[in-house]
Amino acid sequence: MNTKMIFLDIDGTLTEPGKNAPPASAQEAVQRARARGHKVLLCSGRNRGMLSPLLQYGFDGFAGSAGGYIEYGGQVVYDCPMTAEQQRRVLAGFRDSGVFCTVECLDRTYTDDGFKDFLRGQRHGSSELLRWREQLENSLGILPLALYQGEPVYKLVFMCPEREQLRDLESAFGEEFNFCIQDTNQFGLTNGELINKKFDKGAAIRRLSDHTGIPIADTIAFGDSMNDLEMIQTAGLGICMANGSETLRLAADEVCPSVSEDGLYHAFSCHGLM
């Protein structure tokens, strides 16, 4: 078998969302695939700081910030934060719009405390979402936005009560940035990511293919949400987790069992990667 380059999203694919430890079956699959000479990389919306706890499980490299920052074998392959002018305009635009956002730098992440205040004031069962959000911030080391000191920004994660709130932002920044909208959640809130058009997870696969010399045809990508779409479409084989977005499942070449049902181990075994 040719050497394969395998790309793994983290939240909802390698781990349960917001967790920093893969199930034992996924750890074994990664170790055994690498032992056979395959290259296994993380390809995540998380920045370097948030994905770094996963590196202890043994990976050949990673693409963080949805492809905005790439390392392979300890070498920086690609590094593309917003320009200072983009950063100024984007942060001011989101602040003035009332859309809640999380600002992702290289190693630190900052979130708008106004979002939690908003959730506390709702009556539609958002206490569950508030608890999840606070647990997520704690497990991933996310800091209050008030502590942000102007570091270079790679992307934003946003959430708002009404989809219409994004219209002016899309008009202002749509030429430079993609608005990757996830499925509206159970509380009726729209969430998504603002990602520079210079990169995405699919472009990360192409950049790493060029860097390593491993053909695109020998790449395999695993994901679960809409920010994995370009990755799933670009890879030689795109696999969606059963717990993934319905839209992504339709776009994928295959669907494997969910992260909680040893999906990666099952798929690695089926494709002879171990």
Image: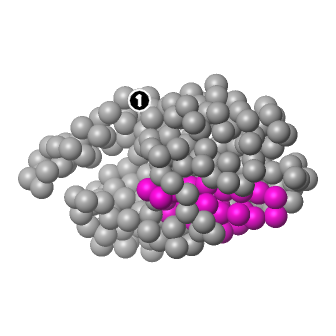
The kind of secondary structure element at disc 1 is helix
**Residue sitting farthest toward the left:** 123
Question: Left or right: where does residue 242 sit relative to residue 211?
Answer: left
The residue wearing badge 1 is: 139
**Residue sitting farthest toward the right:** 213
- Examine the rendering and report whether any part of residue 84 can be seen: no
Total marks drawn? 1
Disc 1: CA contacts within 10 A as few (<14), some (14-19) or many (>=20): few
Residue located 29% across and 35% down the image: 134
| Among the 4 quarters of the image, the one containing residue 271 | bottom right
Residue located 61% across and 44% down the image: 265
Question: Left or right: where does residue 23 sit relative to residue 274?
Answer: left
Q: Nearer the viewer, residue 123 or 251?
A: 251
Residue located 38% across and 71% down the image: 168
Q: Position of residue 2 (x, y in %)?
A: 88, 53
Q: Position of residue 146 (x, y in %)?
A: 35, 34
- Examine the rendering and report whether any part of residue 29 can be seen: yes
Q: Position of residue 225 (x, y in %)?
A: 49, 59
Q: Position of residue 117 (x, y in %)?
A: 19, 42
| Among the 4 quarters of the image, the one containing residue 142 | top left
Q: Nearer the viewer, residue 137 or 15?
A: 15
Q: Which residues are magenta?
A: 217-243
Q: Is residue 235 magenta?
A: yes
Q: Is residue 73 magenta?
A: no
Residue 131's place in the image compared with 251, above or below, is above
Coloring scheme of the render? one colour
Q: Amino acid at mark 1?
A: Ser
Quadrant position of the C terminus in the picture: top right
Residue located 30% across and 60% down the image: 185
